[in-house]
Structure formats: C-alpha cells, structure tokens
C-alpha cells in the first residue's frame, strides 16, 4: 500500500432489511413492507464509502466459506476495493437483520460469525499492509485484541489511526494512546468518557476527558445536528445538511469513510467534516447500507 492509502480493517455482513411502519415490541409480530438484501457491516460500509468517494482503499476482513462470503468478495471487487487481505473462515459469514420504521429509525440484530474469528495472528499476517498504510480505519465489530494490535502496529509505524468506536464496548485504556482520531457519536462518547453528552457544551467536556486518556483528536457525530471537531484548541461545530431522512443505516459509516478520504487528500479536519456531512446527508435519503452510499461525483459543496 502507498503511504497515502486507506486501510480498513473490520466487519463484513450481509444485511437483510425490512421496512415497516413501526418497530416490533418484545413478543410482537409486525407485518412489514419491502424486503431488501445487500452487503453491510461497519468495516465494509466504511471501506466502500471511502472507495466510492475517491480513496485508494484496501479492506481486510474475514468471511465464511459460504455463498454470503462469495457474494461479499465479488461485490467488493466490483466496487474496486483491494480484496487481497480478505480471509476465509470456517465460521459462517456475518449477517445483520435490520428493521427500519417510517421515521427512519432502525433496530439491528447481528450474528457476527466469521467477524468474531479475526485473530491477532491474522493481524500479524497483515503487518506489511498495516505498517505501510497512510490511514488505518477501525471499528468495534471484530475482536478487541485484534483491533488493539492493529492500532498499536499502525501508530508505531507512523500511520494515522482512526477509530469509530461502534458498537460501544469495554476497551483497554491503553488503546486510546494509539488513536490519532476518535469518531464517536454522542452515546458512544458518553459511554467511553463516563460523562453525559446531550449538547455541544457537554460533548466538549467529554471530548476533553477522552484527550486526557490519550486520544489525539475527536470528531463527535451528532446526528441531524452535525459534527463537533475537537483538536485541542477551541472546538468547531460543522452543521449537518437539512434533508428528509428515510433510513439512517450506514450514515455514520459513510461519514467515517468520507472523512478519511478528505484527510488522505490533505484537507483540514474542518474541511473533511464538511465533506463527510455532505456525504452522510445523501446516504440517509436512501434505504439500505452500501447501496445508499454516494459516489464522489454526487457530492456538491
């Protein structure tokens, strides 16, 4: 990989989505509307977003030796991703069952499968790519020891390590010092900082707490409000585009992929956040995960 290339290590899922009027309550059966099946997983979504938006991207993940794995690899190749780092597992490929209501809220159940089989030995086998990338983008749908090992390896090699800490789960405190850019949403930031986050002021306090733990810079995604950039000095708020959302699936993943592309092109975090907000605004106007991710030519700034 070139030293301005983006390496994404993360999850690959097949998403099965049902659009329904209301999300079911426990024990309730709801008759839904349209069913769609497509490629998903936070890692894959972010890799595809970065590739479509102009990045040079390699994706490392683990999929099963099944039809879902075959289809995923074929799809990633079609997107133009470098798939030479995709590993086959004896476990089944990951799947996600998604319900989306008429207010664009979603409810997701994930069977991790092969994603949970991404081992530290797999990371060691990918050391050459990790040490030569410009940006390493990580999430938390694969085992934490593997995330930790990849982050430490890339950081020590001089890469910019970006962590989207989703889904939130316990992390070793030592990991934070290897993170150059932390991209949580409000809930995730509250979880990791231990502080309430419900507005810009509280997000700034929680971001400062994370920087005290060793995190470099933060961009806090705040949904339809926008994103808060915390680089150590006065924070900067980048407002979101006002659009009618139909499905928020993959909006955060699009933001992360877009942001890494802009950073790889030498843009400031403020410029990168504006680009990422524009990309996310397009994503929420379509149903689905990867099929809702825009291409570079669609971004109008």
Image (cartoon, rainbow, N blue to C red):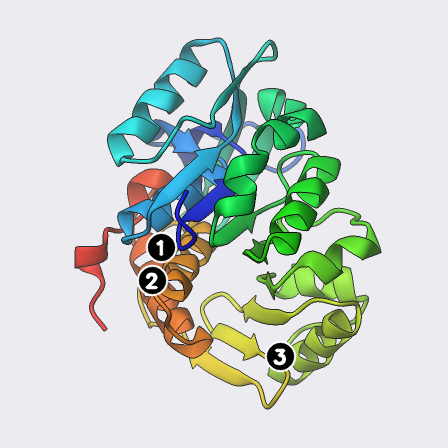
10 Å crowding of disc 3: few (<14), some (14-19), many (20+): few
Query: Is residue 72 placed above or below 270 in the rendered structure?
Result: above
Q: CA distance from mark 2 to mark 3?
A: 20 Å
Residue 143: x %, y % from top left: 70, 34
Residue beneath disc 3:
199
Q: CA distance from mark 1 to mark 2?
A: 6 Å
Residue at 23% x, 63% y is 299
Residue 18: x %, y % from top left: 41, 32
Residue beneath disc 1:
284
- Residue positioned most to the bottom: 234
Label 2 sits on a secondary structure element that is helix
Residue beneath disc 2:
281
Q: Quadrant of the N terminus?
A: top left
Residue 206: x %, y % from top left: 73, 74
Residue at 55% x, 56% y is 159
Taking 80 as reference, is 39 left or right? right
Label 3 sits on a secondary structure element that is loop
């Amino acid at each position: 990989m070139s030293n301005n290339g983006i390496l994404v290590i993360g999850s690959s899922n097949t998403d099965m989505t049902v659009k329904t009027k209301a999300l079911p309550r426990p024990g309730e059966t709801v008759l839904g509307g349209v069913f769609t099946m497509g490629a998903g997983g936070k890692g894959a979504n972010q890799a595809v977003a970065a590739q479509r938006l102009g990045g040079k991207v390699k994706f490392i993940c683990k999929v099963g030796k099944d039809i879902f794995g075959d289809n995923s690899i074929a799809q990633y190749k079609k997107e133009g991703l470098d798939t030479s780092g995709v590993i086959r597992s004896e476990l089944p490929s990951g799947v996600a069952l998604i319900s989306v209501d008429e207010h664009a809220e979603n409810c997701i159940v994930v069977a991790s499968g092969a994603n949970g089989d991404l081992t530290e030995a797999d990371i060691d086998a990918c050391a050459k790519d990790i040490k030569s990338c410009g940006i390493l983008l990580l999430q938390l749908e694969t085992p934490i020891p593997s995330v930790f090992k990849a982050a430490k390896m890339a950081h020590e090699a001089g890469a910019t390590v970006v962590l989207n800490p989703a889904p939130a789960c316990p992390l070793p405190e030592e990991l934070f010092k290897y993170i150059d850019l932390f991209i949580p949403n409000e809930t995730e930031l509250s979880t990791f900082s231990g502080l309430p986050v419900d507005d810009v002021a509280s997000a700034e306090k929680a971001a400062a707490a994370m920087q005290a733990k060793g995190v470099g810079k933060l961009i806090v995604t705040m949904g339809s409000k926008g994103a808060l950039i915390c680089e150590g000095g006065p924070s900067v708020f980048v407002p979101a585009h006002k659009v009618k959302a139909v499905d928020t699936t993959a909006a955060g993943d699009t933001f992360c992929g877009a942001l890494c592309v802009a950073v790889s092109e030498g843009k400031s975090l403020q410029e990168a956040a504006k680009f990422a907000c524009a990309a996310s605004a397009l994503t929420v106007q379509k149903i689905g995960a990867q099929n809702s991710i825009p291409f570079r030519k669609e971004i109008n700034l």
